[in-house]
Image: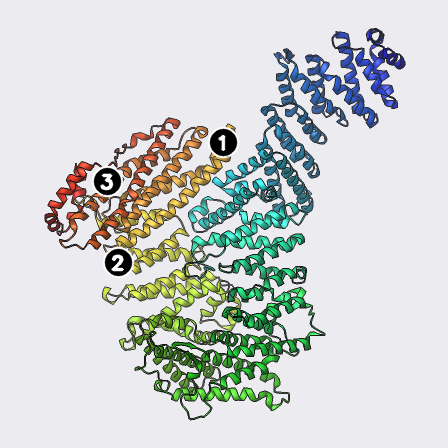
Amino acid sequence: MDQKILSLAAEKTADKLQEFLQTLREGDLTNLLQNQAVKGKVAGALLRAIFKGSPCSEEAGTLRRRKIYTCCIQLVESGDLQKEIASEIIGLLMLEAHHFPGPLLVELANEFISAVREGSLVNGKSLELLPIILTALATKKENLAYGKGVLSGEECKKQLINTLCSGRWDQQYVIQLTSMFKDVPLTAEEVEFVVEKALSMFSKMNLQEIPPLVYQLLVLSSKGSRKSVLEGIIAFFSALDKQHNEEQSGDELLDVVTVPSGELRHVEGTIILHIVFAIKLDYELGRELVKHLKVGQQGDSNNNLSPFSIALLLSVTRIQRFQDQVLDLLKTSVVKSFKDLQLLQGSKFLQNLVPHRSYVSTMILEVVKNSVHSWDHVTQGLVELGFILMDSYGPKKVHDGKTIETSPSLSRMPNQHACKLGANILLETFKIHEMIRQEILEQVLNRVVTRASSPISHFLDLLSNIVMYAPLVLQSCSSKVTEAFDYLSFLPLQTVQRLLKAVQPLLKVSMSMRDSLILVLRKAMFANQLDARKSAVAGFLLLLKNFKVLGSLSSSQCSQSLSVSQVHVDVHSHYNSVANETFCLEIMDSLRRCLSQQADVRLMLYEGFYDVLRRNSQLANSVMQTLLSQLKQFYEPKPDLLPPLKLEACILTQGDKISLQEPLDYLLCCIQHCLAWYKNTVIPLQQGEEEEEEEEAFYEDLDDILESITNRMIKSELEDFELDKSADFSQSTSTGIKNNICAFLVMGVCEVLIEYNFSISSFSKNRFEDILSLFMCYKKLSDILNEKAGKAKTKMANKTNDSLLSMKFVSSLLTALFRVLLWRYTSIPTSVEESGKKEKGKSISLLCLEGLQKIFSAVQQFYQPKIQQFLRALDVTDKEGEEREDADVSVTQRTAFQIRQFQRSLLNLLSSQEEDFNSKEALLLVTVLTSLSKLLEPSSPQFVQMLSWTSKICKENSREDALFCKSLMNLLFSLHVSYKSPVILLRDLSQDIHGHLGDIDQDVEVEKTNHFAIVNLRTAAPTVCLLVLSQAEKVLEEVDWLITKLKGQVSQETLSEEASSQATLPNQPVEKAIIMQLGTLLTFFHELVQTALPSGSCVDTLLKDLCKMYTTLTALVRYYLQVCQSSGGIPKNMEKLVKLSGSHLTPLCYSFISYVQNKSKSLNYTGEKKEKPAAVATAMARVLRETKPIPNLIFAIEQYEKFLIHLSKKSKVNLMQHMKLSTSRDFKIKGNILDMVLREDGEDENEEGTASEHGGQNKEPAKKKRKK
């Protein structure tokens, strides 16, 4: 039969073939086709023949085709056919599909859809035919019966796609079904159906199946719905990441078998690559991605960003078109995240409203950690982002050339954190990715070398961390480091020191690097530039410290610098012990030559030798001999000659120029430290051994010399140095300059000798008397210098900063003094102290308190981790038996104990009479309390107690001291914001200010409230007024931040009505809190705008803050414009707020503006007859400054009213009924009226000048204006 069909098909006409096919029974043809196909015979030719004999023009032919199609689809699905035959059959069916009439195409499509929904597909091969059927259907123009109605081909296709997408899809055919749609012409709506269905299948699929599905979705997105595709993918993987992290951090054993971390990261990596590839082909997709993630910038960036989306963005930076905007987006997100964190940390009000979330910085570091799973496409972006953050937010140079390394001011904190994050990104990326290491190192070194003039400490810290992490690994990059060495002589000294310190572990493991450094340093030793020579000295000293000679003592400092596992393998062990000694002695020879150079170079040597000895004790002999021979040049050996030092030899005179040649004080300081170290460390170890006497000769010689200098310095008078009161100390004469240098040398020598005698004193009375004699010599000179040279005071200040007393000596004294200070201050009240003990206006108690205050702030600023130990040390009742219990006592409890002592002192002080009140002491006490209160836990009862105590002090004590008032109020506010919002406190204070200063309308008498006694006529303005305004500004900033956050959430919501109506519910507590805050602030401003504030900063700040108030109110109105459609109106409390603003604020603002303007007009009349032009100019400048914010305020009020009108229309609530529309203000200058007024002013000048002398006249115009 098959042969006959084929032979008939070979004829030119198909008539006989048609006749033959009609004679066959229904099942014959399908059985024949089935047998041929299964046997693997050529079914294609038979199928072509059947189609030729079954034209669609005849009904019988069409039906035959329909049956053949059904048969073939079942055959292909059965899985019994060979691959080639199945493909051939499907190919033929595709070619012939468009000949079908519309109704049969609908039937075929429905068959497919039913098979998909019922899950009856076996291998899904036949699905290749469905897009052809749908495409053919879309081309049919005639109306087709579909369901109960009649639809066009295009509409039928839409209905079929909708039915298919709303049904169940078997997991194994999801990819095929999604892929199928790329061959079907789809409308935007149809693409959305398909995309939504495919995205909903993500959660039901195996993780490994998701990348191919994502690929198909991205291909499909070229037809539309790019935003939905990207949002869906990002949302799914962000949620998966979050779930994965929670599972890993949770302790409980999970029943569900979770996805292994490695597998998840590999899948994410593949998907990111698919998306980046798709963006390269379709830039619109990239624009959609950036746009989608930028939306988060308006509200809360943490909502939109996740480790997955950040990794995706970083990969997109490889596409040049998007590189800049993506990096900029990430940079902005990082800083915004840190600013948000800072705002949250500073406000209990915000902490209660906003749940804690992970921050962008944590997410980025998570991306770095995840990138270990072959995410090479992310590394370049990470490196670029790291350097951008470090470059943009590193320490900045200030005007005097110094850098701001770590500023405690809050505004800099986000920038510092951003810079630190950049460094962490680079360091962690360096650790994980070998291929990028060279590039990171090269970029860091480039910045160190090329940015010598700007601060680079953050890059040097990063370099140090990189080197410490892997010195052996970095040997491969050693050429980059040796290149940097060539620039050493051109870099600033500080940079050289830190650079060499950073790369020092590398010098330990790379001989070639060490040799190239030595060559560079030797060359620099003889350079013309002083800085280059100093750099050489710094480099050589560093080498001496770190290349230990055999037999050197191990010291804690030594192990500190090399606590890296890789360096513990000492590559010098067999050869280097001897080589190091030769090498170090060579360096010592080079350094001895420096002793003939300028004072600065010598100074560096003296400052460095002590560290060298501590690290490399075998060099003691060489170093001490060098120092001894240097000292002998300036030492007077005869025991009865005074003074004992040749100061003249230390000074170099070249014509008129006089300069210091030998820093003798530093030389002696170095000797004293080295000698003390030698005695304490080396000699005890040598006692059991027989040593040659020559070895110890230098030690005894130096001891004798220092002893002799001490004795003779005590005997010497200032006249012996020619430095008595009659000497010339002016900076303009050569003698004066010389005497100044000598005086500083003598003072330095005194300091060194004080420390030397203290170290060998064993607390003997004679030694302490010597110390006091040396101190008196120091003090006499210091007093003469202060008295003689007014200009030298700045020098003196520098001198005290560069004290030669070591930290060890100072801390020994302070430890002894501190307990005395604390005991003495808390035990002996100042009032009891005898007046005879006062010195230059400062009592001993006050000095004790000042010392305490400095120590408390220093410990908090520099030794934060050791606060617990510090507070424990303060507890004098500490006994051995209580030590175990003691460990459980918290910082808050210990702090509270100390606070109570100072609270008692302040109460004693406040209970004294006004004339006995010591303002300085009160100020110091408040500063101490402020420092200590920062250590209290805000949730603790001790904190609440401190707050109520401070509040009580402010309420009950009235002092007219502005500084004391300011510090106390600052303490109150700082405590208050950590506990709750300060708005009610602000309202009460504003009523007090209004009561004390009076009303802008002089006829109105204001009732005095007296909530806080600290507010009085003297302190109300400007002190308290400016403080409350700055706090109000902070509250407005917080409210503004919350409104922006809400707006961002609204703009991210989907457009569906249910989603948006649900989304408004969680925001209700935030909205309510915003309205409450603004309502209370409104009453605060209501009081202040009626207050007769004095001209100046108060008026200026109030006008600016009012402007901010209206801007924030406008922002809230605009937020309700966004949400009122979905939520069906606006809340009642919002209506009340609008009503309050209309009745209690806007009209009073205009009155206040008139008051300010009239006040400035009356300035013309208040001047005296012979007023100087300069004073008039100053007054006018102040007027201009004060009136400048007025137009801004009026604009802000009018903007607020404009958006209220819009909201009234949208919400169908008449919000404007409470608003008295503002007066139209015309700012046009009318020339004729101006001339007339100026003429009148000229005529009446004398009259007005006299009138203005009477008090209160300057407020008169305001009163008249109000009465019109």
Q: CA distance from mark 3 to mark 2?
A: 32 Å
Residue ID for mark 2: 958
Residue toward you, 1156 or 1249: 1249
Q: Earlier in the sequence, mark 3 or mark 2?
A: 2
Q: How packed is label 2: few (under 14 Cα within 10 Å), some, or many (20 or more)?
A: some
Q: Residue furthest left?
A: 1247
- Say what amino acid the circle numbered 1 marks: Ser
Q: CA distance from mark 3 to mark 1?
A: 43 Å
Q: Position of residue 1022 (x, y in %)?
A: 27, 53
Residue 740 picture quarter: bottom left
Residue 251 in sight from this viewpoint: no
Residue 192 screen position, x and y as percent: 60, 27
Q: Which color scheme did the rendering employ for the protein?
A: rainbow
Write down the residue under mark 3.
1151
**Where residue 834 sits: x, y (%)?**
28, 76
Q: Position of residue 448 (x, y in %)?
A: 55, 59
SS at badge 1: helix
**The disc labelled 2 sits on which kind of residue?**
Ser
Check disc 3 and give the amino acid type: Ser
3 or 1: tag closer to the N-terminus: 1
Q: Any mark on residue 841, and which?
A: none
Tag on residue 1060?
Answer: 1
Would residue 1176 appear left or right of 723 to someone viewing this image? left
Q: Does residue 969 lie above or below 1259 as drawn?
A: below
- The answer to whether 100 is drawn above or below residue 1155 in the figure is above
